[in-house]
Amino acid sequence: MELFLDTGNIQEIKELNSILPIDGVTTNPTLIAKENKRIFQSVKEISNIIGEDKIIHVQVVSSDFEGMMEEARFLNKLHKNIFVKIPVTKEGFRAVKELSKEGIKVTATAIFTAHQGVLAAKAGASYVAPYVNRLDNISGDGINVVKDLLTIFKEYNSNCKVLGASFKNAQQVLEIFKHGIQSVTVPADVAKSLMNHPLTDYSVDKFVSDWEEVFGEGTKII
Ligand code: E4P
């Protein structure tokens, strides 16, 4: 299972990359714009932290086919292991098909139905990214879209991976872990809620205080 951080924030990436076994970073125009840096600068800084072999998913901003192609070719050169995110609009589907022919690795994004994911995989996308929370927010069922995609890709022996995206809480992530998702991308707060538990902290504090009561404050095992 691959774990990505969904952020363009360098401090968050530095902190979480030093703690968690992350496979890379996903960004989108909103996340990059929040940092107010040029895209090449952001990608360079992220690459320096996570290393050139790790994956960076970067999204185009253009919404027309020619613009998407031009931006994708540019983004593809910014890091050794780039996956260019293309939203699955009509123009986007066309770009996924053409970029895949050129050998540029594509992550089809802004996916809200299994149908979109299947078509993107057939067009050559390496990953499809269904947006779980955004769908849940409008009374849809994001987990179900993920489950359908996993079932269909398995049925067809597809190499395309499902990259679960847009999470707001640890429970949503747990639900799709249960269905054997290949990849998830989580923002920093969700990454932290996946690893933290107050009882873990409480237990550790208790171990230390029990130890120190007998052996003295600040004493170690060795
Ligand atoms: C996916 O790749 C997107 O960057 C992202 O997960 C969207 O998440 P949001 O709904 O939290 O903005």
Image (cartoon, rainbow, N blue to C red):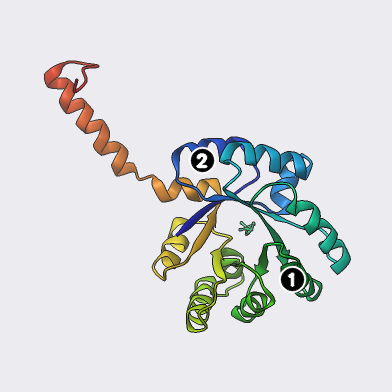
At x 62%, y 47%, the residue is 7
Left or right: where does residue 193 sit relative to residue 128? left
Could you tell me how many numbered marks the image carries? 2
Badge 2: few (under 14), some or many (20 or more) residues near its Cα, within 10 Å? Answer: some
Quarter of the image for the N terminus: give it. bottom left
Q: Is residue 12 visible?
A: no
Q: Circle 2 is placed at which residue position?
A: 17
Quarter of the image for the C terminus: give it. top left
Report the amino acid beneath label 1: Lys
Q: Point out residue 11 in the picture as x, y percentages from the top left corner.
A: 59, 35
At x 52%, y 36%, the residue is 15
Q: Is residue 123 visible?
A: yes
Q: Point out residue 115 in the picture as x, y percentages from the top left corner.
A: 63, 82
Q: Circle 1 is placed at which residue position?
A: 101
Report the amino acid beneath label 2: Asn
Left or right: where does residue 48 sit relative to residue 37? left
Query: Distance between the Cα atoms at labels 2 and 1?
Result: 33 Å
Mark 2 Cβ inside 8 Å of ligand 1: no
Q: In what quadrant does ligand 1 lie? A: bottom right
